């Protein structure tokens, strides 16, 4: 089965861990490529390659600031990722609620003298 191109949508783009790191770095505000290179400890061509993919799927915007190009996150394409992940968040919350019920039940049970070794 052929892999989908990384530039088809936000899901493919964020599947790569370095791209997620770049998005995390840009979540704090605009940065130039050089800032990302220094911050992430990656080579400039590697950062540029990932930024190109992120830009092609619309996850980052770029603007010129003199001789620098500043990148920033565009969160709109992440909405589809959020919507998909939210389904699983509900599943986990239901499981945590069940676990809370069990823990509450265990917390209300008092140990008997016979089981604790006390009173001997």
Image (cartoon, rainbow, N blue to C red):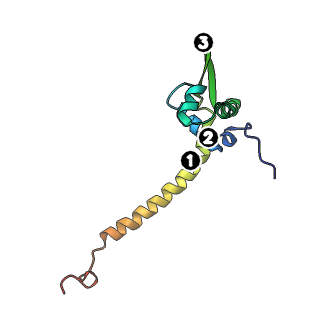
Kind of element beneath mark 3: loop
In the picture, the disc for residue 86 is 1
Task: Evaluate if marks 2 and 1 touch, with contact meaning CB atoms under 8 Å apart.
Answer: no
Between label 1 and label 3, give the one nearer the viewer. Answer: 3
Task: Kindly identify which residue carries mark 3.
Answer: 66
**Residue 51 in picture, x, y percent from top left:** 66, 31
Q: Which one is earlier in the sequence, the residue at label 2 or at label 1?
A: 2
44 relative position to 40: left or right: right
> Camera-side residue: 8 or 84?
8
Task: Kindly identify which residue carries mark 2.
Answer: 18
In the image, residue 101 sits, relative to residue 19, either above or below, namely: below
1 relative position to 118: left or right: right
> Camera-side residue: 71 or 59?
71
**Residue 62 in picture, x, y percent from top left:** 63, 22
Determine the residue positioned at 81% across, 53% down.
1
Task: Evaluate if marks 1 and 3 touch, with contact meaning CB atoms under 8 Å apart.
Answer: no
In the image, residue 120 sits, relative to residue 30, either above or below, namely: below
Determine the residue positioned at 58% across, 31% down.
37
Q: Quadrant of residue 5?
A: top right
10 Å neighbourhood of mark 1: few (<14), some, or many (≥20)?
few
Q: Quadrant of residue 120?
A: bottom left
Q: In which quarter of the image is residue 58?
A: top right
Kind of element beneath mark 1: helix
**Residue 45 in picture, x, y percent from top left:** 68, 31
């Amino acid at each position: 089965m052929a892999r989908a191109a990384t530039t088809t949508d936000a899901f493919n783009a964020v599947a790569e861990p370095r791209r997620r790191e770049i998005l995390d770095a840009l979540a704090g505000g605009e940065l130039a490529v050089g800032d990302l290179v220094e911050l992430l400890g990656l080579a400039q061509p590697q950062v540029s390659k990932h930024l190109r993919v992120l830009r092609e799927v619309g996850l980052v915007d770029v603007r010129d600031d003199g001789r620098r190009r500043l990148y920033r996150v565009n969160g709109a394409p992440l909405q589809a990722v959020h919507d998909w992940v939210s389904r699983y968040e509900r599943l986990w919350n239901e499981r945590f609620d069940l676990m809370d019920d069990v823990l509450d039940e265990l917390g209300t049970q008092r140990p008997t003298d016979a089981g604790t070794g006390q009173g001997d």
